Image (cartoon, rainbow, N blue to C red):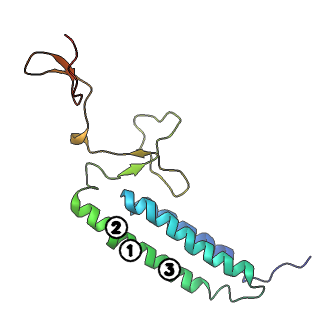
Amino acid sequence: LYAKSIPEALPVWIYGFAMIWEYFSMVFVRSALSAHFFPRLTFLYFLLYHIYFYSIPYGYFDVALIPLFLFMLHAMLYTILGLEAPNAARGVVNVECPREVYNRLSWHEPVAALPAEWTMFLPLNSRLSPLHDRVSDTPTNDANNNDRWEGDGNAAAG
């Protein structure tokens, strides 16, 4: 019957936070660890804010955005410094392999289009491997002149 009293700009702030999370995940979340960690932690922080929002009838909702922002900043800094920097130093994420995990789309994608990026809202279902670490499917001859597929330990009958 009566609407809950909330600050007028609260939906804009929540939408702004969601945009920041989305842009951060598109630009900085590139390794498998950070792709696993960052969305779950931001969901936890967002869920805690909503638990406060729906459990207190007339709370300080605009003031509660400050800790949400600080927790969001904590998640971003930890993702960059604790997860992305070590993976970049190990070479897991580099120029040749800019993202360790991505989502493979079920629809056709033009060859000339930009590669598909993932967002927090699409599931990750594929793992990218560097070009030189891939096993090719071309037949090669081993020392005994037996045809076998590269990467396959079994020699095929010639």
Hey, which quadrant is residue 65 in on the image?
bottom right
Residue hosting label 3:
71
Which label sits on residue 140? none
Q: Amino acid at mark 2?
A: Leu
- Element class at badge 2: helix
Q: Give the CA separation, mark 3 to mark 1.
A: 10 Å
Residue hosting label 1:
78
- Residue 101, given in percent of the width and then of the height, sits at 39, 50
Q: Earlier in the sequence, mark 2 or mark 1?
A: 1
- Residue 134, given in percent of the width and then of the height, sits at 26, 38
Q: Amino acid at mark 3?
A: Phe
Residue at 23% from the left image edge and 31% from the top image edge: 151
Q: Residues within 10 Å of mark 3 (few under 14, many from 20)?
A: some
Hey, which quadrant is residue 146 in on the image?
top left
Q: Are marks 2 and 1 in contact (CB under 8 Å)?
A: yes
Q: Earlier in the sequence, mark 3 or mark 1?
A: 3
> Is 32 situated left or right of 158 in this image?
right
For residue 116, above or below residue 143: below
In this view, the residue farthest toward the left is 143
Residue at 22% from the left image edge and 16% from the top image edge: 156
Residue hosting label 2:
83
> Is 119 situated left or right of 32 in this image?
right
- Residue 129, given in percent of the width and then of the height, sits at 30, 44
Q: Amino acid at mark 1?
A: Tyr
Q: Residues within 10 Å of mark 1 (few under 14, many from 20)?
A: some
Residue at 74% from the left image edge and 85% from the top image edge: 56
Q: Confirm whether residue 9 shows in the render.
A: no
